[in-house]
Image (cartoon, coloured by chain):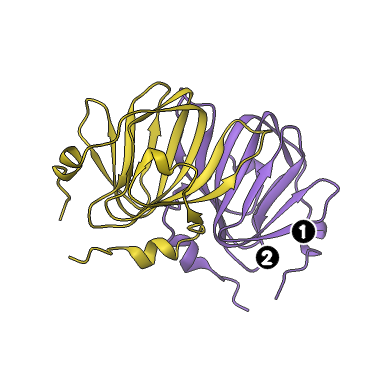
Chain colours: A purple, B yellow
Amino acid sequence: MSDKQNETAVKQGIFSIGTANQAYQQYFTGQSYLQSLVADPAVNVSVGNVTFEPGCRNHWHIHHHGFQILLVTGGTGWYQEAGQPARQLHAGDVVVTHDGVKHWHGATQNSWFSHIAITAGTPEWLEPVSDAQYKQLKEEV
Amino acid sequence: MSDKQNETAVKQGIFSIGTANQAYQQYFTGQSYLQSLVADPAVNVSVGNVTFEPGCRNHWHIHHHGFQILLVTGGTGWYQEAGQPARQLHAGDVVVTHDGVKHWHGATQNSWFSHIAITAGTPEWLEPVSDAQYKQLKEEV
């Protein structure tokens, strides 16, 4: 299996991949990219297109006094809430994270991954997803 | 020009076209389709994939105590706020409608059109966009 699976599909998606995600780099393991789509003080959500290189994932985090909706636009990734099994994600999948729920999301080891994130509230960033934990996740074949 | 422009691209998009939009049919001119993506009482927005056949558009409407964000996913369409020129939309475009702003959106005469709608607040549905008004809009070529 190529370690660049879905790279073209993700990079040529409907919404731009944007630029290297410097602002949030400290809260990610690996390389991500961010294209802001909506950052408007008159609405209570922000919208962005987030792209993860294979192996990239964000740290465990919580959205306080808010929520997060993920609309998966390309590649293959993971979503996991604390105490629950990880859910594998593909284009067209939708995830809703409720207020206060600890979770993380990111690419699989072998695939690029992209989602639109619709986010409200204040994030609290927690510990990274360890290599040991991440690498034991089993991809569907 | 085919009157079915972009039909395949829109129907084979990342998010399902859903079913005939019966719930809102009275507020649309022409045929639309709706696939609900998020309808969760724990979050303050709903998310849906809305598809318009060529010539289809919704009535003028207002989102009170809320907003609407459109993420264009396919085809060619129009967005217009009252008193402003219509803006032509293509895949990747983003529109933010603020609280209280009267507006409409829909397909061009010759193209299918689809967008994700992220909506908060209570809609007030107003008069249709007349054929005379709609048909004088000039498509880019």
**For mark 2, what is the residue?**
A109
**Figure check: A24 above or below A115:** above
The secondary structure type at the circle numbered 2 is: loop
Letter of the chain that mark 2 sits on in the rendering: A
Q: Quadrant of the C terminus of chain B?
A: bottom left
- B23 on left or right of A108: left
- The span from disc 1 to disc 2 (Cα, nearest Å) is 9 Å
Quadrant of the rendered structure where residue B38 is?
top right
Same chain for marks 1 and 2?
A: yes
Label 1 crowd (10 A; few <14 / some 14-19 / many >=20): some
Which is nearer the eye, B92 or B80?
B80
**Figure check: A4 above or below A64:** below
The answer to whether one can see residue A105 in this image is yes
Letter of the chain that mark 1 sits on in the rendering: A
Residue drawn at x 70%, y 76% as measured from the top left? A141
Quadrant of the rendered structure where residue A45 is?
top right
- A29 on left or right of B122: right
Q: Which mark is residue A86?
A: none
The secondary structure type at the circle numbered 1 is: helix
Residue drawn at x 52%, y 30% as measured from the top left? B120
Residue drawn at x 57%, y 48% as measured from the top left? B37
**Figure check: B138 above or below B97:** below
The answer to whether one can see residue A22 in this image is no
- Give the x, y percent position of residue A23: 55, 38
Q: Which mark is residue A134?
A: 1
- Mark 1 near mark 2, Cβ–Cβ under 8 Å? yes
Q: Quadrant of the N terminus of chain B?
A: bottom left
Which is nearer the eye, B56 or A34?
B56
Q: Name which residue type carries label 1.
A: Tyr
